[in-house]
Amino acid sequence: MGITKITSMFIGEYYHNLDDKGRLALPVKFRVKFKGGLVITRGLDNCLFVYTRQDWQILAEKLSKLPINQAKTRAFARLLLAGAMDVAMDGQGRINVPDYLLNFGLLKKQVVITGLYNRLEIWDEKQWQEYKQRTEKDSGEIAEALGELGV
């Protein structure tokens, strides 16, 4: 079995604003990675996932191989695949976030874009702060569980 090559690496936390038309500027340092287009979809915990088209193709192929006779795998594939939209950046590095994804992500004016290795996540700023506080509070337990997995 071959190793899947991830084409992008994203890290960091970036604060941006949605404009009145639902457009969002991507962090400047990541824009070159999205020159070939991007895919935005429903994520987990009410955030949105953003992938380069290449990395989306890798994920979509994996999802297509999940057993369709299991309800949870069907539900997960539907969440990501049916919610996905091809999006292009404009000349100012902005993307237009579709209304159904704005609603899913509970996105208001202020958002946080987080880099998570092969994807970006887009969070409503308030939701992100609440999530981060919960996670930081439980960081010891999380680290212990990851240690059991060899991380």
Image (tube, rainbow, N blue to C red):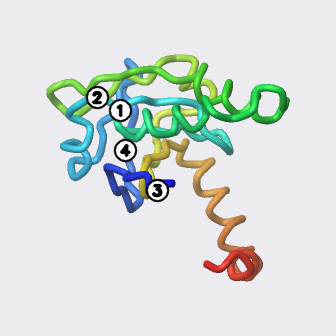
Q: Which mark is residue 137?
A: none
Q: Amino acid at mark 2?
A: Gly
The answer to whether residue 69 is above or below residue 123 is above
Secondary structure category for the residue under label 4 = strand
Label 4: how many residues lie within 10 Å, few (<14), some (14-19) or many (20+)? some
Secondary structure category for the residue under label 3 = strand
Please name the residue that numbered disc 1 is placed on.
53
Question: Which image quadrant is residue 124 in?
Answer: top right
Question: Which image quadrant is residue 35 in?
Answer: top left
The answer to whether residue 63 is above or below residue 113 is above
Query: Residue at coordinates 28% horizontally, 47% vertically from top-left?
Result: 27
Residue at the limit of the structure toward the front, as seen here: 1
CB atoms of marks 2 and 4 within 8 Å:
no
Camera-nearest residue between 43 and 105: 43
Q: Amino acid at mark 3?
A: Leu
Mark closest to the chain's N terminus, 3 or 4:
4
Asked if residue 105 shows in the view, the reply is: no
CB atoms of marks 2 and 1 within 8 Å:
yes
